[in-house]
Image (cartoon, rainbow, N blue to C red):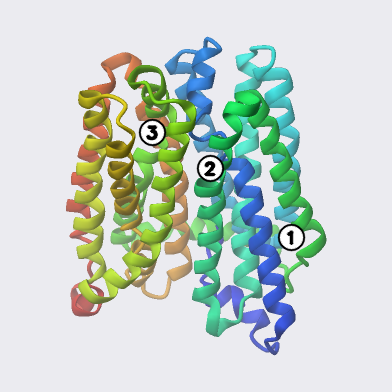
C-alpha cells in the first residue's frame, strides 16, 4: 500500500469541488472491488480440502498458501509506490490482467492435469495480481475522496473488500459447490473477477494526481523500514498486526480440510460457517471503532482482540473435535472468533500516532504486517505434518498472548492519556 498518509494522497484533489459525479465514481469503484473480491475469495474455504482429494498432501498445500502470502505481501507493499509512478488505474488493471491470466494457467495447466509446479507458479504470481488490484484501489480511493470524508471513504473501501472477499464469496461458493462442484466453482470465480475488472476498466476513471519518478516512489518503501529504527513502537505494532490475522490464514491452509475430511462437515456447511464468521468480522470493524472511542484502543486490542482470539482459536479447533460436526455450536464459536479478529482494527489509527510526522511510513508498516500474516499463517500450517495439528493450534493461540503483551508497549509516554 501507499507509504503516504491519506491527507498527502488527497492533497492534489483538495481544490476540486465535490459533486455527484465524484460520489458516482466511488460507488462504481466499490462495486468493482466487491465483485472482483468475490471471485478472488471463492476458493478460500474449499481449495485446501479439494487439493487433498486430488492427492496433494498437507505440506504441499501449505507451501502453496505460503508462496501466495509472500507474493501478496511484497505486491501490497509495492502497490502504493507503483501507483505514485504509474497511476493507480494502471496498477489496478495490470493486477487484473495478471490475475485472469494466472488463474487460467492454474486451472488448465495445474489443477486439471495435476501439475504441482505449475500450480505453485501460477498461484504465486496470481497473488501479486490480487494485491495490485486491491491495494491499487486503496490508493485510488485516497486520491478521489474528498479530504473531509476521506476516513469514511476508506472505511467503505474496507467494507467492500471484506464483503466481497469473505462474505459474499463464501455464500456463493456454498450454493455452487453442490451444483457444479469444486472445479466448476473455480471457473466461476474467473467470471466474477472478469466482471469486476470490466467495471474498473469502463466505469472507474484514472485518478488525477501528480506522477512522481519511479525511483522517488520506491524510496518511500525504504522510509517504511527506517521509521521502525526511529520509532521502535511502530515495529512492535507491525508485529501485532502480523499476529492479528495469522490464525485466519493458517486455518485456510489446514483447518478447512480438517473440518471437512475429519470432523465431517459438508463443503456447503463449512462454507456457511466460514461466510458467517467473516460477516461477523465485517461488523466488528464498526464495533471496534466505537469500543476504542469509549474504552481506549489498547484495551480493545488487548482484551477483545488478543484474549478473544486466544480463546476462540482454541475453541474453534477443540470443540468440534470433542463434539463432532455440530453446525450451530460451531457457527456460534466462528462468529465470536470473527468478531475477535476485527477487534485489532484500532491499530490502524493507533500506530500512526506513534510515528510523529512519519505517519505514511507507519501505515506502510501496518500494510506490510497485514500482508506478512498471509505468509506466516501458512508457514505455521506447514508444521502440521511435522508436529501434529494440536501443537500447531496451541502455537497459534499462544501468539495472541504474545500480542497482548506487545500491545502494552504501544503508548507514547508524553501522550499516554490521548492514546490509551
**Residue bearing mark 3:** 250
Q: Is residue 360 left or right of residue 136?
A: left
Earlier along the polypeptide chain: callout 1 or callout 2? Answer: 1
Q: Quick check: can you spot residue 84?
A: no
Earlier along the polypeptide chain: callout 3 or callout 2? Answer: 2
Q: Circles 3 and 2: CB distance less than 8 Å?
A: no
- Quarter of the C terminus within the rendering: bottom left
Q: Is residue 153 above or below residue 340?
A: below
Callout 2: few (<14), some (14-19), or many (20+) C-alpha neighbours within 10 Å?
some
**Residue bearing mark 2:** 171
What residue lies at 61% left-to-right and 30% top-to-bottom?
123
Q: Is residue 369 above or below residue 268?
A: below
- Picture quadrant of residue 363: bottom left
Q: Is residue 52 left or right of residue 332?
A: right
**Residue bearing mark 1:** 89
Earlier along the polypeptide chain: callout 1 or callout 3? Answer: 1
Mark in front: 1 vs 3: 3
Amino acid at each position: 500500500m501507499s507509504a503516504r498518509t491519506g491527507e498527502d494522497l488527497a492533497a492534489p484533489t483538495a481544490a476540486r469541488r465535490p459533486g455527484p459525479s465524484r460520489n458516482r465514481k466511488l460507488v462504481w469503484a466499490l462495486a468493482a472491488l466487491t465483485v472482483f473480491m468475490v471471485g478472488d475469495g471463492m476458493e478460500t474455504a474449499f481449495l485446501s480440502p479439494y487439493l487433498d482429494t486430488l492427492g496433494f498432501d498437507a505440506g504441499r498445500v501449505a507451501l502453496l498458501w505460503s508462496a501466495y502470502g509472500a507474493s501478496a505481501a511484497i505486491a501490497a507493499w509495492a502497490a502504493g509506490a507503483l501507483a505514485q509512478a504509474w497511476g493507480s488505474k494502471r496498477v489496478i488493471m495490470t493486477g487484473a490482467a495478471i490475475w485472469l491470466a494466472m488463474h487460467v494457467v492454474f486451472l488448465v495447466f495445474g489443477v486439471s492435469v495435476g501439475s504441482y509446479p505449475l500450480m505453485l507458479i501460477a498461484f504465486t504470481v496470481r497473488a501479486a495480481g490480487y494485491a495490485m488490484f486491491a491495494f491499487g484501489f486503496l490508493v485510488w480511493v485516497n486520491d478521489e475522496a474528498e479530504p473531509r470524508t476521506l476516513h469514511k471513504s476508506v472505511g467503505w473501501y474496507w467494507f467492500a473488500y471484506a464483503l466481497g472477499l469473505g462474505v459474499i464469496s463464501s455464500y456463493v461458493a456454498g450454493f455452487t459447490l453442490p451444483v457444479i462442484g469444486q472445479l466448476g466453482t473455480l471457473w466461476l470465480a474467473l467470471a466474477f473477477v472478469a466482471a469486476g475488472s470490466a467495471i474498473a476498466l469502463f466505469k472507474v476513471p484514472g485518478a488525477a494526481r501528480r506522477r512522481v519518478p519511479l525511483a522517488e516512489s520506491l524510496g518511500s518503501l525504504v522510509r517504511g523500514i527506517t521509521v521502525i529504527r526511529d520509532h521502535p513502537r511502530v515495529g512492535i505494532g507491525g508485529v501485532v498486526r502480523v499476529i492479528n490475522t495469522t490464525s485466519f490464514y493458517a486455518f485456510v491452509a489446514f483447518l478447512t480440510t480438517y473440518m471437512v475430511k475429519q470432523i465431517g462437515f459438508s463443503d456447503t456447511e463449512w462454507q456457511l460457517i466460514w461466510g458467517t464468521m467473516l460477516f461477523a468480522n465485517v461488523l466488528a470493524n464498526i464495533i471496534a471503532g466505537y469500543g476504542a472511542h469509549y474504552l481506549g484502543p489498547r484495551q480493545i486490542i488487548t482484551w477483545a482482540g488478543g484474549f478473544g482470539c486466544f480463546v476462540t482459536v482454541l475453541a474453534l479447533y477443540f470443540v468440534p473435535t470433542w463434539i463432532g460436526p455440530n453446525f450451530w455450536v460451531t457457527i456460534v464459536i466462528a462468529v465470536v472468533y470473527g468478531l475477535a479478529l476485527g477487534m485489532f482494527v484500532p491499530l490502524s489509527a493507533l500506530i500512526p500516532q506513534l510515528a510523529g510526522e512519519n505517519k505514511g511510513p507507519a501505515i506502510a508498516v501496518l500494510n506490510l504486517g497485514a500482508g506478512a500474516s498471509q505468509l506466516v499463517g501458512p508457514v505455521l500450517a506447514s508444521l502440521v505434518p511435522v508436529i501434529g495439528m494440536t501443537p500447531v493450534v496451541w502455537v497459534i493461540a499462544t501468539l495472541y498472548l504474545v500480542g497482548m503483551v506487545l500491545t502494552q508497549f504501544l503508548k507514547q509516554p508524553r501522550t499516554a492519556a490521548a492514546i490509551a
